[in-house]
Amino acid sequence: MMPPAAKSALFSVKWTEAMRRAGRAAIWPVFAGVLVACGAGPTAGAEPNSPSVFDGERARVIVADQVALGPRVPGSEAHGRAGEYILARLQDEGWEVEEQGFDDRGGQRRNLIGRGGAAGGPLVILGAHYDTRPIADRAEPPVEAPVPGANDGASGAAVLLELARVLPADGLDFRLWLVFFDAEDGGGLAGGEWILGSRHFAATLEDTPAAVVVVDMVGDADLQLRYELHSDEALGQQIWATAGRLGYSGFVPEPGYSILDDHIPFLELGIPAVDLIDFDYPYWHTTEDTLDKVSADSLEQVGRTLQMWLTELDFESLE
Ligand SMILES: [Zn+2]
């Protein structure tokens, strides 16, 4: 994403069958039990074999898988392989996949879409970019090397892919698309632009989503998610309130930065959209954006908050 304009002082599942049968009211006790278990320590609380609850350790493995491919610079072999990895995982979890190709200065790029949920009804989109920045231009001194993109690139995609495991692709009563945007992070370099994938996606969108939530840079061990100031305020408050009820300190209900990210093209269409981003990340656009900076607990806070928010979603509240 683009550097913040300024720090503004103005606030200008796969459900288990039992849960599915019991309905939404059953979700809370399940989460409450997990939270109690978390007190015993990070490994004890994750219930890594539970299919129904977002698992931060699993999400961190998905970050590691992407980082192990190498920098996912558009046009590179690693980038292509990351795309195949995302598509394969979506398909394995029962999501219907689609690739949406587009051109960037003669190079072929592709957004990746996993569709699930009901056949009709309201549409919710969760988005994240999966490409990484070609040059670590914030490194001091600047280096020609690409950004490893453990947090800036892999973390958001990992949250979406772990959600693909725990959310029932065929059991929601609304439509849910998981969208992996390409070519987000080339702005300001050799004529490159920001957020090309989401711009293309939004420009060709034939539906009107009820809500769009973008996750980007959500893996920092020192997680501090503040309100991104372009984002839809009411939608943001819902998500932060959900995190607050779950007791998650990584969501700080205070104004943060204004950031050009993949939510902007949707806001420009009048669609409520929120960017979940922790921009206080000293390794941003450096070669130090590596796996050791990414915490399973941070990924879990974001993933479980989104899982809970989706589970409780009241579409009338979005109108
Ligand atoms: Zn970036």
Image (spheres, grey):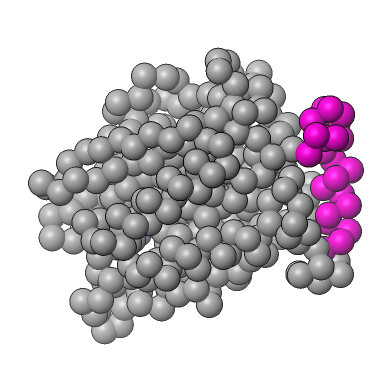
Quadrant for ligand 1 reads: bottom left
Position of residue 76 measured from the top left corner of the image (x, y, whole percent): 24, 61
- Give the total of numbered labels: 0
Residue at screen point 45% across, 47% down: 88
Q: Is residue 261 above or below residue 131?
A: above
Residues 10 and 62: in front is 62
Q: Is residue 92 above or below residue 57?
A: above
Q: Is residue 174 left or right of residue 136?
A: right
Q: Is residue 28 magenta?
A: yes
Residues 259 and 107: in front is 107
Q: Is residue 134 above or below residue 201?
A: below
Residue 263 in view, yes or no = no
Position of residue 231 measured from the top left corner of the image (x, y, whole percent): 49, 40
Residue 157 in view, yes or no = yes
Q: Which residues fall within the magenta stretch?
A: 16-38
Residue at screen point 66% across, 22% down: 173
Residue at screen point 58% across, 64% down: 60
Quarter occupied by the N terminus:
bottom left
Q: Quadrant of residue 79?
A: bottom left
